[in-house]
Amino acid sequence: MTQPKIREWPSYRTVWRWHFFAGIFCIPFVIFLSVTGTLYLFKPQFEAWQQRPYESVASIDSHRPMSQQVQAVLAEYPTAKTIQVELPRLDSGATRMILKDARGTWRIYANPATLAILHVENENTSLMKRIKALHGQLGIGTWGSYLVELAACWTIVMIITGLVLWWPKNAKGLGGVLYPRWAKGSRVLWRDLHSVIGFWVSAFAIFLILTGLPWAKFWGNYFRTVRQTAGLSSNTQDWSIGGKPTESQSGHSEHDHTAKTVSSKRPGRSAGAPIPKDLSGFDVLEQIAKRELLAHPVVLSPPEKEAGYWKLASESQNRPLRQTLSIDVKDGSVASREDFSGKHWIDQAVGIGIAAHEGQLFGGLNQILGLMTTTGLIALASSGAWMWWNRRQKGTLGIPEPLQQTPLVWSIWMGILLLGVAMPLFGGSLLIVLLFDKTLCWWGQSP
């Protein structure tokens, strides 16, 4: 009588094989994304250093009205289509204006007392914008976003399989489990460094990956579609998808049919707002901004339509601190206020995750944790690559041999299925890898 096959968990060899495939694909991306992510982590410090010459240019009592400052800049850029004003962090600092014309989008630093233009830079080609584009889209747009998303998903596989390989079964003590064994020779030391670093960094790395997915082109649109289908969507979304602003960031409200509609769609900085005929609204917004004490940077925007409400918004990287106020400049009243507590709970969760991902949720400690995570990931990827290259049989890729295995327990297949549904781009790539693996096995068995 034939005994039925007993279903089991994946063998060590099977897990190692999948860890190898995931690592070979992910290692270059992990290193690149960790380096660019680390650079962007310290964006506030870099920009503060970069803007030092413009932080003390005029005393507060010498400032001209904001409307005059805007008018002076517009006189130098008569073909401008949109404009926004960013208030300086310090009262003595230069006023920043984000202006768009046919040539591009410009960040202009103006002396608030003399109205002189101190500095002009291309808003879309600044160093931090370039680093952000490299980090999110590899600098090549949509296809780069797809590759980053694929690498992120397979990095999760790499981490999970790595934890399974690390799991102590017959360990004698904590050496090689929680800390490396320094006196066991270079081979053991490299193995310990790789596995121990992987253990300590794994939770933080998975958190960074999951909080980065809302930005990805495929997953971001997938997430938005699921929310809309389930009736969980919000009118606003203050993060971009695939490097492009969403409709709620575009500065155009499809349903603003009346002159005084309180639009909940905040005009995004990338789009700006049309230049009004009467610039005195900037004076009103500046006075209200001093009273409201919003988190820096604070952006003043004209209405989307001439008779609409002006906008006063905090664009803080610490997203729970963000607020957007709709202002009636005729009497200085606040027509509506949108803050973090009023957002859908899903938007709040994503906002907190993004703020933590960028290292801005809880100050310097958040940046230190981010730096430790990215440094650990670089060490993990580098040590994995070094061990593979030096331990493989010369002249081969060192691919672990496939092992015939009895059917897996249902929970493993259920987990793989759920992961594929949660991350469809990963699910599709998994099918391709499975087909590739089966082909390799078939070739290996052919006479």
Image (cartoon, rainbow, N blue to C red):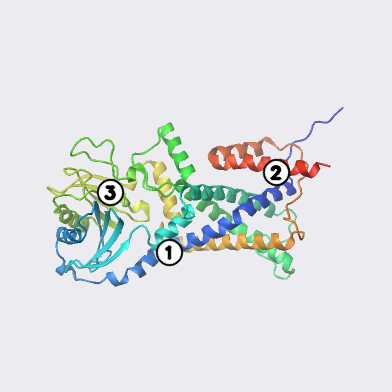
Q: Is residue 287 left or right of residue 378?
A: left
On the image, numbered disc 1 is attached to which residue?
A: 42
Task: Inspect this view and state whether residue 229 appears.
Answer: yes
On the image, numbered disc 3 is attached to which residue?
A: 324
Q: Nearer the viewer, residue 196 or 101?
A: 101
Give amino acid for label 3: Thr
Give amino acid for label 1: Phe
Question: In the rendered image, which quarter is residue 380 located in?
Answer: bottom right
The spot of residue 398 in percent (x, y) is: 73, 55
Give amino acid for label 2: Asp
Q: Are marks 3 and 2 in contact (CB under 8 Å)?
A: no
Q: Is residue 39 left or right of residue 253?
A: right
Image position of 365 with respect to 102: above or below: below
What mark, if any, has residue 176 been given in the picture? Answer: none
Circle 2 crowding by C-alpha within 10 Å: few under 14, some 14–19, many from 20: some
What mark, if any, has residue 437 been given in the picture? Answer: 2
Element type at mark 1: loop
Q: Is residue 320 left or right of residue 406?
A: left
